[in-house]
């Protein structure tokens, strides 16, 4: 049997993404000989153990990373500074530190300075997920056919980047390397702004008068229903994403607000051609997604 990529992989944070990586590692093999699972929440850790997601379970991140040749942070990005401070001194020389956080400039800012020089730092972000969270929500095939974006800082050991690419390859994802600011702008428009709009529209509906609010729920059309699905995502994770991708998110929100105003103007003045053109362009985007198998 071919040797696994890593001898000992420590996954810190065993929620939707961490448990999907763990399940994939189990199901497809070849990633790690020993999987160490760590979570701050003891109930979550016990649940991960009951589900058989790892080989060892450890609540203390410093102990979890001891002797690991790969460590993957899978906690909300707001927890990263404290986590990096806790594990930094205990990372093994020659190990690779990676992550799955949805914002990447903040990860370089918060974690980068705490990574020992003997450790390679290869931040990553799988573009895959669901609105569910916790260890029960994970799926071995969550990353199949999806992308994982890697943002290694300049000068990162190429061999370490190749190994992280290989890990995602086993989980079925394609990888692309880009710089962190570019990553954050792309994700602001494809993921963070849509979530902001979903949270906002649900709030707007909830603020309606009692009678109307009841009807919103009773007669929810597919458009509103789709927003409620997105808006049911984890509050801590999304709070952290918004606060850690502030600039790019505000830039995309400003662009969106301008375009929404232009649409409002077209509606007010009965500019049918403008409205139709926008809808036609949107349908083309949907078709391109389907063609790229990302729908
Ligand atoms: P999740 O299901 O809420 O899981 C996160 C887990 O991390 C929870 O069990 C949480 O425990 C634990 N945790 C929090 N602070 C910790 C700490 N200091 N040490 C150890 N464990 C800690 O969230 P998720 O959806 O897997 O997201 C994890 C990461 O993946 C986030 O950085 C997110 O940005 C990124 N991501 C998410 C998606 C998505 O669609 N969900 C997609 C791509 C990337 P508690 O519940 O007790 O806080």
Image (tube, helix red, strand yellow):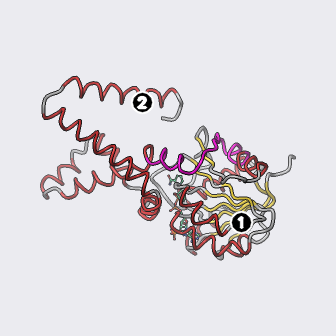
Looking at the rendering, which quadrant does residue 120 occupy? Answer: bottom right
Q: Residues within 10 Å of mark 2 (few under 14, many from 20)?
A: few
Mark 1 vs mark 2: which is more N-terminal?
1
Q: Can residue 83 be seen here?
A: yes
**Is 179 one of the magenta-colored residues?**
yes
Residue 106 percent across, percent down from the top left: 53, 60
Q: Residues within 10 Å of mark 1 (few under 14, many from 20)?
A: many
Q: Can residue 173 be seen here?
A: no
Q: Is residue 50 left or right of residue 203?
A: right
Number of marks drawn: 2
Q: Residue furthest front?
A: 154
- Describe the element under mark 2 as helix, strand or loop: helix
Q: Is residue 156 above or below residue 114?
A: above
Marks 1 and 2, Cα distance to the nearest angstrom?
41 Å
Task: Return the residue nearer the eye: 53 or 84.
Answer: 84
- Residue contact between numbered discs 1 and 2, judged by CB atoms under 8 Å: no
- Describe the element under mark 1 as helix, strand or loop: strand
Q: Residue at x 18, y 54 (%)?
A: 213
**Is 98 one of the magenta-colored residues?**
no
- Dominant secondary-structure state across the stretch colored magenta: helix
Q: Is residue 251 above or below residue 238?
A: above
Looking at the rendering, which quadrant does residue 138 occupy? Answer: bottom right
Q: Residue at x 20, y 49 (%)?
A: 216
Instruction: State the extent of the magenta-drawn residues as a range.
Output: 166-188
Residue 228 percent across, percent down from the top left: 33, 50
Residue position marked by numbered label 2 in the rendering: 285
Of circles 1 and 2, the one toward us is: 2
Q: Residue at x 16, y 56 (%)?
A: 208
Q: Is residue 17 left or right of residue 10?
A: left
Residue 36 bears which disc, if any?
1
Residue 226 percent across, percent down from the top left: 35, 44
Q: Is residue 34 left or right of residue 125?
A: right
């Amino acid at each position: 049997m071919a040797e696994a990529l890593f001898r000992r992989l420590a996954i810190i944070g065993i929620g939707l993404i961490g448990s999907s990586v763990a399940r994939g590692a189990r199901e497809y093999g070849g990633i790690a000989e020993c999987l160490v699972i760590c979570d701050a929440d003891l109930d979550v850790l016990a649940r991960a153990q009951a589900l058989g997601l790892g080989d060892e379970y450890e609540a203390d991140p410093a102990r979890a990373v001891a002797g690991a040749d790969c460590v993957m942070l899978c906690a909300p990005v707001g927890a990263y500074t404290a986590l990096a401070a806790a594990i930094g001194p205990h990372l093994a020389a020659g190990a690779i530190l990676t992550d799955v956080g949805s914002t990447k400039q903040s990860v370089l800012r918060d974690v980068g300075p705490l990574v020992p020089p003997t450790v390679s730092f290869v931040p990553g972000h799988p573009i895959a997920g669901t609105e569910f969270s916790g260890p029960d929500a994970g799926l071995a095939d969550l990353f199949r056919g999806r992308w994982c974006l890697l943002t290694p800082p300049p000068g990162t050991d190429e061999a370490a980047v190749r190994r992280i690419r290989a890990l995602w390859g086993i989980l079925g994802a394609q990888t692309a390397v880009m710089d962190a600011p570019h990553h954050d702008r792309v994700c602001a428009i494809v993921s963070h702004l849509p979530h902001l709009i979903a949270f906002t529209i649900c709030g707007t509906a909830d603020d309606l008068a009692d009678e109307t609010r009841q009807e919103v729920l009773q007669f929810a059309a597919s458009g509103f229903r789709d927003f409620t699905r997105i808006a049911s995502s984890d509050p801590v994770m999304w709070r952290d994403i918004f606060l850690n991708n502030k600039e790019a998110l505000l830039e995309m929100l400003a662009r969106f607000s301008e375009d929404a105003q232009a649409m409002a103007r077209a509606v007010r003045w009965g500019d049918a051609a403008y409205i139709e053109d926008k809808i036609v362009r949107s349908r083309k985007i949907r078709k391109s997604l389907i063609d790229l198998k990302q729908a």
